[in-house]
Image (spheres, rainbow, N blue to C red):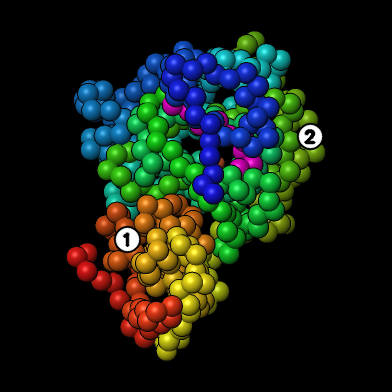
Amino acid sequence: MQPKYTEIAKDEPIPMGLTEKVIEGEVFVIRGCLQRLGVFDEIAATSIAGIRDAAGAEVVGKIKREGFDAIHRFASLDQIETATDKIYEHACDKAPDWVSKIAPGLLGITEPYFFERGPNIRFHVPYDIMASNVEAMDRFASKSGGGKLAPHPNHRDSWVGCPDNLINIWAAVGPIPEGNGLTLFPDAFTRDVARVGASIAFDENPGEPLNFNLEPGDTIVFHGEHVHSSVLNRTDGTRHAVSFRIVKEKPHFPNTHYHRYAHSSLAGGPLDFFAELPANLAWSYVETRLGGAAKKLGLKKEEPQRQNRSHASQDKKPLGGKRTFSLSSLPENSLHAITDEVCVARIGKDKIAAFDRKCPHGGGDLALGVILDGEITCPWHNLRFDPKTGASACQTLKRVRMYDINVEGDDVTVSLDNPHAPAASG
Ligand code: FES
Ligand SMILES: [Fe+2]
């Protein structure tokens, strides 16, 4: 069954008790949320100010006419990176005020609460443009965290130095269609999910994905322990989103205590200097800082931050020969690994495809993906592949190699001898 979220239309009130439901794992999309809370114009103006600092008034004029999703047409990747930094500078000062409207207006929280100091500013240009300078995007990600300019693989927020009791408020500043947004995997919410460093383990199946189509101001509200990832941008528009993290009680850091959380009654006022103290009075904070110092002194090894994105023997050549299976053993719209390197998909009732398991983007195991709208969908960044040609919408990526198939009655035979990338018309 496809996972679901609760959608609140623009003319419907924000439901009472939303926070409790989110804490239990429910996912909400609130249409026009930032406008209803009275923060959209200021958030958009802050983005414009940062872009002006980085790229000048002429670029700003064009973006005002064409929209944030057109920024990559007028600003270079370097300028977009600088703009992100500049927006952070402006937004950190304004965050206490924005959050003071979001917490009561959206979450119904009136008691003091904690919030992440800096909102997360996100620009994801179309992948084919980003591919020209992946190193710069990855550099930014290691400096400022994943998911800002470069896509983030499946993770829980507590794996990246956040509390495990946070509510994530992820809002579109520009239009964000489904091919360039956020993916959530609600099936994994209450499950033990294996990870390596800050990413899901290569052989872990996150379950059915939940994707969204957002207009400016629309907001996804979800618990930070949902497994989630960035969609690899397969559209021709840039994603511009901002996200806030709020905790009703004291933040609890089960892993590293990396992100800075401010107390709402101290932040933004004369005692702002002390606003992080209540959250930092925790052993997790001391342990993280001591660990950081030990790493600097070479007394402690870095945790593996990124696994080798390869299936155990995936880089080996396919074994060759043939594999046979019965069509009836493969449910409609499902995938199944037939070797360490190759998997098959049954699309609808009659279409069968055999192809390499390794995603040409980051090595995600396509055998753990899903079939969406008749296409093979990678579990890591939701990229889709045509099951006839192995092509995706990202032209700079290689096609997935396909294998010949012969169907006789219920018997399907896959020939592993001749992997090939068929032409688009094939
Ligand atoms: S889309 Fe990124 S690994 Fe497949
Ligand atoms: Fe996240």
Residue 220 drawn in magenta? yes
The type of residue carrying mark 2 is Ala
- Tell me: residue 362, above or below residue 239: below
The 10 Å Cα crowd at callout 1, few under 14, some 14 to 19, many 20 or more, is some
Badge nearest the viewer, 2 or 1: 1
The image shows residue 331 at horizontal and vertical percentages of: 50, 64
Disc assigned to residue 88: none
The image shows residue 421 at horizontal and vertical percentages of: 28, 72
The residue identified by callout 2 is 282
Secondary structure of the residue carrying tag 1 is: loop
Residue 21 drawn in magenta? no
The image shows residue 140 at horizontal and vertical percentages of: 45, 44
Q: Nearer the viewer, residue 113 or 416?
A: 416
Query: What residue range appears in magenta?
Result: 218-226
Residue 84 appears in the figure: no
Q: Nearer the viewer, residue 225 or 93?
A: 225
Quarter of the figure with residue 43? top left
Answer left or right for 73 relative to 223.
left
Q: Are marks 2 and 1 in contact (CB under 8 Å)?
A: no
The residue identified by callout 1 is 386
Which numbered disc, 2 or 1, marks the residue that appears first in the sequence?
A: 2
Which residue occupies 39% across, 16% down?
41
The type of residue carrying mark 1 is Asp
Mark 2 and mark 1: span between their CA atoms? 50 Å
Secondary structure of the residue carrying tag 2 is: loop
Residue 269 appears in the figure: yes
